[in-house]
Amino acid sequence: MFSLRWVSVCVCLLLADGCGKKNAIDGTYHDSSGLMTFYFNRGSAEITIIGMTKEYDYEVVGNRVTLRRDIDGRAQMEFIINPDGSLLDPKSGNIAKKSDS
C-alpha cells in the first residue's frame, strides 16, 4: 500500500511538471512599423508601444491568442496565429513577426 501512494505522488508530480511549459508562440515579436514589441513567455505577455509597457496574461486556443489584464479579466486584445507563425491583429490588420533572438 505504501508503494502505491508513492506511485500516485510521482504521477501527480509528473502531471504538474507540464504546467507552465513554454507555448509555441513564446518569444519576441515586432510589428512592421517597429513601434510595437510583444514578448510572450509562459502565459505572461508584455506589450511595449512607443516605450510604454503593459503586462497581460495570455492563453492560446486553436489559432487565437487572447490577452487579458489582471484588472478585470476581460479580453483586451486578440491575435490570430498565421500559418507562418506571425501574429495578426484582426482589428488593425497589423502583423507582428517573431524575431530570431
Image: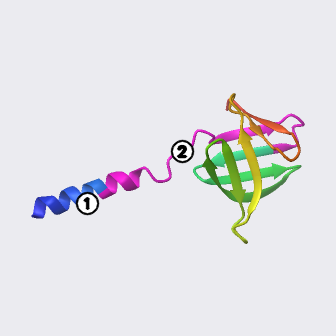
According to the picture, the residue beneath numbered tag 1 turns out to be: 9
Q: Quadrant of residue 35?
A: top right
Q: Is residue 31 above or below residue 19?
A: above
Seen from the viewer's position, the closer of residues 20 and 88 is 88
Q: Residue 86 location, x and y as percent? A: 73, 34
In the structure shown, which secondary structural element does the residue marked by tag 2 occupy? loop
Q: Residue 11 location, x and y as percent? A: 28, 54
The reply to whether dot 1 and dot 2 touch (C-beta < 8 Å) is no
Q: Quadrant of residue 76?
A: bottom right
Measure the alpha-carbon separation of dots 1 and 2. Answer: 24 Å
Which color scheme is applied? rainbow
Which range is magenta? 12-36
Quadrant of the snapshot with the N terminus: bottom left
Q: Residue 71 location, x and y as percent? A: 73, 71
Q: Is residue 44 above or below residue 34?
A: below
Residue at x 46% of width, y 53% of height: 19
Q: Earlier in the sequence, mark 1 or mark 2?
A: 1
Farthest bottom residue? 72
Instruction: Tell me: 13 left or right of 64.
Output: left
Q: Residue 17 lies in magenta, yes or no?
A: yes
Dot 2: within a 10 Å radius of its alpha carbon, few (fewer than 14), some, or many (20 or more) residues? few
Seen from the viewer's position, the closer of residues 74 and 34 is 74
Instruction: Tell me: 23 left or right of 49.
Output: left
Residue at x 11% of width, y 64% of height: 2
Q: Is residue 93 above or below residue 10?
A: above
Q: Quadrant of residue 56?
A: bottom right
**Three-letter amino acid code at the position of disc 1:** Val
Instruction: Tell me: 71 left or right of 16.
Output: right
Q: Which mark is residue 22?
A: 2
Task: Tally the marks.
Answer: 2
